Image (tube, rainbow, N blue to C red):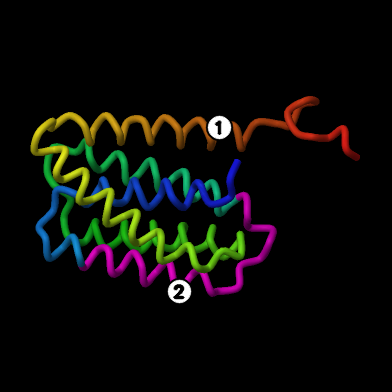
Amino acid sequence: MNSMLPAVLVAAAFGIAIANVRSEWLWSSIVVFVASAAIVAFAPIPAVWNERTYLACWIVIVACSAGVHLPNALRARVMVVLAVVAGATGGAVAGAANAHAIVASLSLIATTTSLASRAAAQRVPLAPKVVSSWLIAVALLAATLQMLPVTPGYLPDHLE
C-alpha cells in the first residue's frame, strides 16, 4: 500500500465532512486542518508509532465519514476537533514517510473534495453519503487487515 494513501483519504473524508457547513466555518476548519498537519508533520515522531499512526488515520476516516450521516450539520466545536485530529493524523503520516511537501496537497485535497461534495449534494443529495460510506468500508477493512496476524504468503517473508 502507498504510505500516503491514508493521509489522502483522511483529507478527502474531512472535506466531505465539512462540506455542508457555513462558508466561514468551512474556511476556518481548513486553516486549522492545514496548521495542525504542518505542525505534526515536522514534529519528530518515533518510528515505533508508525502502525498506530496508520490505525489513527483509519479511525479518523471513519469518524469524519460518519459525520455526514448525522441528521444535523456538524457544530463548530466538533468541526474544530475533527480538523485538529484529521490534520494531526495526516501530518503524522506525512512526517513518517518523510514527505513533508504533501501537507500542501492535503489542504488542496480537502478543499477540492469539500467544494465538489457541496456541488454534488445540490444535484444528488445522496452522493456524499454514498462516498462517505465507501470511505468507512475501506477504512474498516484496512484497519482490520492491520490487526490480523501475519500468515505465510501475506507478506513477502520469502526474501529473508
Find residue 64 and report its horizontal and vertical position in percent: 32, 46
- Check disc 2 and report its element: helix, strand or loop: helix
Q: Which residue is mark 2?
A: 39
Find residue 16 and report its horizontal and vertical position in percent: 26, 46
- Which residue corresponds to the image point at 55% horizontal and 49% vertical from the top-left? 54
Question: Within the magenta stretch, is there residue 36?
Answer: yes
Find residue 149 and report its horizontal and vertical position in percent: 71, 31
- Which residue corresponds to the image point at 24% horizontal and 56% vertical from the top-left? 78
Image side of residue 54 versus residue 87, left or right: right
Image side of residue 87 versus residue 126, left or right: right
Question: Relative to 80, is 136 above or below?
Answer: above
Tell me the quadrant of the picture where the C terminus can be found. Answer: top right
Question: Relative to 87, is 60 above or below?
Answer: above
Q: Which residue is mark 1?
A: 144
Question: Which of the two discs, 2 and 1, labels the residue nearer the N terminus?
Answer: 2
Amino acid carrying label 1: it is Thr
- Which residue corresponds to the image point at 83% horizontal and 35% vertical from the top-left? 157
- The local crowd at label 1, few if under 14, some if 14 to 19, many if 20 or more residues have their Cα within 10 Å, is few
Question: Within the magenta stretch, is there residue 29?
Answer: yes
Amino acid carrying label 2: it is Ile
Pick the front one: 137 or 110: 110
User: Which segment did they paint magenta?
Assistant: 28-51
Which picture quadrant has residue 110? bottom left
